[in-house]
Structures are given as structure tokens and as C-alpha cells.
Amino acid sequence: MSVFQLNQDDIQNLLNEKSEKNKKTVISKLVGDFKSGNLSEEEVKLANEIFLLMVRDIDKSMRKVISKGICDCIDITSELVDTIVLDPDPDVACPVLKASPLLDETKLINFAKKLPESHNVAIADRQDITDDLSSALINTGSAAVVKHLVKNSSAVIGGKNLNRIIDNFGSQQEISDSMACRQALPDEVTLRLIDLVSDHVRTFIVTHQNLPGDIAATLLRDNRRRASMRMLGVDSSEGPDVDDLVEALYENGKLSDSVIYQAGLVGDSSFLVSALALRARIPVSNAHLLVHDKRRAGIRALFKYCNLSLDMVEPIYYAITQSIHLSSATDEDQDGVEMLIAERVLQNYAECIPKRQINYLMTRI
């Protein structure tokens, strides 16, 4: 049996058929004939009429077979598409909502305004989502819809809409984490996400998003410090290891001389030692001994080997010794200690520190 062989009696017999199995067999055959591309213009027209009659009159399982079968066809009529899309059952409507090439932006925006959440989730999974359609989906106020939208890597979501998502759904971890893993986020959005996402996603942000290396390194070190605080009692989960963070910066081309200087100038010896060890390709234990050599000969030799400025040795060694002293002599937290170190380094070594590093230290005060 092919589509064009059905007459009105055949259609009525199909609608009155009691056997679900037989119905599915006939419908599947009709769908196969339709998708084959071998039907004439008149046969395609008749097939559309049959499908439209079926999706209006038969039970869900049959409507579902039709929807799945013709969801990506270009020869179905607008009336048939709309009838399926407006079906209250998501199992029937969603295949067409997700895949039909006949649904343009205007139609989809209008549908998003009136369809239920389950249907809009299907729209959010489409491969042709524009920024205007993203806006309409965000306007639904549904966390489920927005979750699917931000996970859809092909969806276009502009800066304004990304900020709207943070405003309305940023507190929901799965949404903020998924959003952070999108490609090429605006810096403003990236920085807003830093405090919302989980630790492993935070590390992904600063190593994969297009943040300047200086900002990325600072955020990574802050991330490690936040994880360390949890490990001391607030939260038992383990945070990222400093060596892993340094390696992530290195692999993404962000472990610059400036990043290393900035870590050293605020007394972050763990980051400094790990970065120098990676640069010099020596064990971290060796780098630790060289950096903490009281005669400065070790750190000077390490800087020279890594092609770093020897002018930075004295201020960085001073910052490291201050960090050791202040960590045991003050009740300040790590941010407070770094602020004190930055002040003292500026007071004693401002004349030999590049302007860029001075500006950085000023931001830490």
C-alpha cells in the first residue's frame, strides 16, 4: 500500500481499526512513503490531508508515531505543523517543536508565549535559536526551559540576555554552571559568574574563557583559597590543587611573567613555587628550596633560568618572608594578609617594580 492508493473508505477503515498494532503498521507505512521523496505533488497533498485527519482523531500513540515520523519534513503543511505543535501532549508536540524546519523565529516566539513548559523545553533544544527567541524563552520564567537553553551550545544568547539569566536564575547551580561552560562569554558575564558556580567550573571559567591572564590568575588563587577555607571546616569537599591550577593556566597560555610576579608580590609562595617549577621543569620540592634560600641565590638562579626579571627578586622575596611572618603574627585572613603585604611592598620597593605590577598591587589594597 502506498499513500496515493488510499481512498476515503480506506481512511475511515483506518480510523475505525480496533487493533493498535495494525494502526501503527499502516501509519508507519504512510510515513515511510511520505519521507521517501518519491510521491507526486498530488500524492504529497493527499498525504498531508490524511495525516491532518489522523492527528485530530486518533489516540496519542498514533499521533506520536506521525509526529516523530514527519517532524523534520519540509513538505508538510503549515496547518499540520500547527495542529501537532498545539497538541497538549508533549510526546506528540515536542518532536516537531524541536526539529521542524518550517517553524521560523516569529512562529517560535509566538508559541513560546502561550505553550506550556514541556513544549518550551523542546524549543530550547532547537539548533537555530536566535537571541530574540532566547529572550522569549527567558521570559517564560521557567528554570527548566532556561536550563535547556544555556546547555544548548548552538543557541545564540546575547550579553543582555545572559545577564538576565544571572539576575533571575543565577542562584541555581546547574544553570550557572552550564552557563559558565558556554563559549566566548563577555567578560562582564564571566566575572559575575565567578561567585555563583562550583569550584571545578570556576577553574574552567578562568582557564578557558577569554579573561586577561592577570585576572585569571588572581581568580584562580582566590578560588584555591576559598576551597582551603572549606577544607578547614566549612565544607569537607576538596578544592582544586594549586599545581593543577597552575598547569591549567600554562596549558591555556595564561601563565605569563606578569602572573608569576603578581603571585609573588602578594606573598603567594605556593603559587609562585608551582609556577616556577613548571617553567623550569623541575620538581616542586626543588623549586621550594630555591625560592626560600635565605641568601637569595636560589631564587635568583631560578628567575634567571626562567628568563624572569632579576629586578623582581628582592621585592618578591621580601613579600614571601612577610607572608610567613604575618600569617603567624596576625589574626588577619588571607585577603587581609595580602593587603598588608601589598602595602609594605609598595612602601619599600615601588621604585624597582614595573608600573603594571604597581597598579596590580594598588588593587589589592
Image (tube, rainbow, N blue to C red):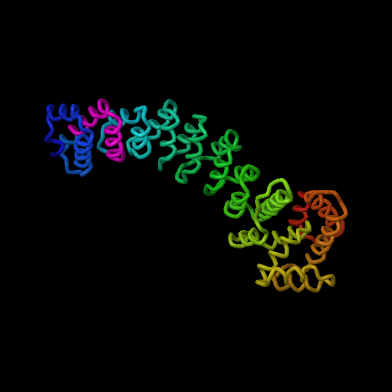
- Vertical position of residue 188 compared to residue 107: above or below: below
Q: Along the line of sight, which residue is nearer the eye, 292 or 217?
A: 292
Q: Position of residue 315 (x, y in %)?
A: 82, 62
Q: Is residue 177 magenta?
A: no
Q: Is residue 51 magenta?
A: yes
Quarter assignment of residue 41: top left
Q: Position of residue 303 (x, y in %)?
A: 74, 70
Residue under the point 19% across and 41% down: 33
Q: Is residue 234 left or right of residue 179?
A: right
Q: How many numbered tags mark residues here? A: 0
Question: Quadrant of the image for the N terminus?
Answer: top left
Q: Is residue 246 left or right of residue 106?
A: right
Q: Position of residue 97 (x, y in %)?
A: 37, 35
| Residue 350 visible, this angle | no
Residue under the point 15% across and 28% down: 13
| Residue 162 visible, this angle | yes
Q: Which residues are magenta?
A: 45-73
Q: Along the line of sight, which residue is nearer the eye, 216 or 92?
A: 92
User: What secondary structure prevails in the magenta region?
Assistant: helix
Quarter assignment of residue 253: bottom right
